[in-house]
Amino acid sequence: MRAAVVINPSKSAGRDIRGIVARLGSRHGWEEVLWLETTAEDPGAGQAREALAAGVDVVIAAGGDGTVRCVAEVLAGTGTAMGLVPLGTGNLLARNLGVNVADVEGAAEAALLGQERKIDVVRSSRDGGPEQVFLVMAGLGFDASVMASTDSQLKDKVGWLAYVDAAIRNLQGRPIKAKISVAGEPVVSRRVRSVMVGNCGRIQGGVEIFPGAAVDDGILDLMVVAPGKLGWFGVIAGVIGKGRSKDTSVEYFRGTSVEVGLDEPDDFQLDGDHEGKASTFTARVDPGALLMRV
């Protein structure tokens, strides 16, 4: 048995990741680990393809959600298992899979020796561009603006609380007219602040953005945010109430595919990484396409 580790070197400072994985592999009779470092030009996809070409048994993504997404984009549909060693700020997929993000050694051991399970991936496209995969959530509008304006230095100091600072600075943004369809059926045509499509439900702090969402249910979850008379208090109430009130500040929809069109481009994010701006977005679920070892 042999493992490859696709590692973001900027995330592993001060952590003996290489030593931990090497010791675990040696203890259980695995061959020498193949180490592949990401770069600014190639944040994980090229390294994952190299790992597949080497014929390894598991590819471990060691980094944040961006590294995880890039590796998963290559591994989805191949049948080669993927493991996680969460080293980022959000680590949202790891949290949704029950991985202890504070236990690096435990995560590494699970990636090598844990149980395998299939999870869904979401195949998406913006403005008619090339297909991209995401695992946790994508968003147009407010949430993506938060990602774009988060202070990286502050994030290094206080972690996910830096997103709260960015959110406060973006509260006064302007709504944009959106037309949204789920599974081919129109569901929304009005001005909104944010449209989020989720593959699983939980974010930092244990907050459940998409009620009842599961990473292996073959369904996409959609949240539309449009603050009304109560402003953002209505949004907070809608999230807490999981959209059960008659107030349309927060609306939830579910289906196997989503199409979003905006009257003008707005900020866009995939799994927490700001990807620029977009005015159209499509997404479809690919059930059970990724084999995880956790």
Image (cartoon, helix red, strand yellow):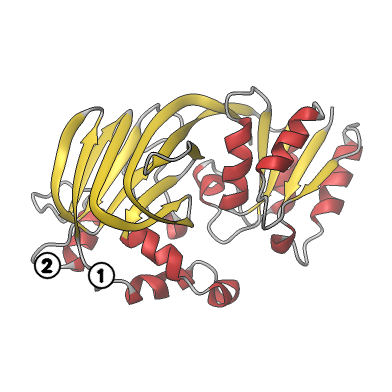
Q: Position of residue 189 (x, y in %)?
A: 13, 45
Q: Position of residue 164 (x, y in %)?
A: 40, 71
Kindly report the distance in space between the C-alpha atoms of the residues bearing marks 2 and 1. Answer: 16 Å
Q: Is residue 227 left or right of residue 5?
A: left
Above or below, comparing residue 98 to residue 53 in the picture = below
Do residues under tags 2 and 1 come within 8 Å of each other at their CB atoms?
no
Position of the N terminus, as image quadrant, is: top right
Query: Is any atom of residue 24 visible in this view?
Result: yes
Q: Position of residue 144 (x, y in %)?
A: 39, 59
Numbered circle sitting on residue 271 = none
Instruction: Tell me which numbered mark, 2 or 1, is placed earlier along the sequence.
Output: 1
Q: Position of residue 99 (x, y in %)?
A: 59, 45
* Amino acid found under the numbered disc labelled 1: Gly
Circle count: 2
The residue lying at 87 percent from left, 52 percent from top is 19
Towards the viewer: 290 or 111: 290
The residue lying at 54 percent from left, 69 percent from top is 159
* Amino acid found under the numbered disc labelled 2: Leu
Above or below, comparing residue 135 to residue 9 in the picture = above
| Mark 2 residue element | loop
Numbered circle sitting on residue 230 = 2
For label 2, the crowd category at 10 Å Cα-Cα, with few meaning under 14, some 14 to 19 and many 20 or more, is few
| Mark 1 residue element | loop
The residue lying at 70 percent from left, 38 percent from top is 48
For label 1, the crowd category at 10 Å Cα-Cα, with few meaning under 14, some 14 to 19 and many 20 or more, is few
Q: Is residue 108 left or right of residue 148?
A: right
Q: Is residue 73 left or right of residue 83?
A: left
Towards the viewer: 279 or 252: 279
Position of the C terminus, as image quadrant, is: top right
Residue 129 placement: quadrant: top left
Numbered circle sitting on residue 173 = 1
Query: Is any atom of residue 199 visible in this view?
Result: no
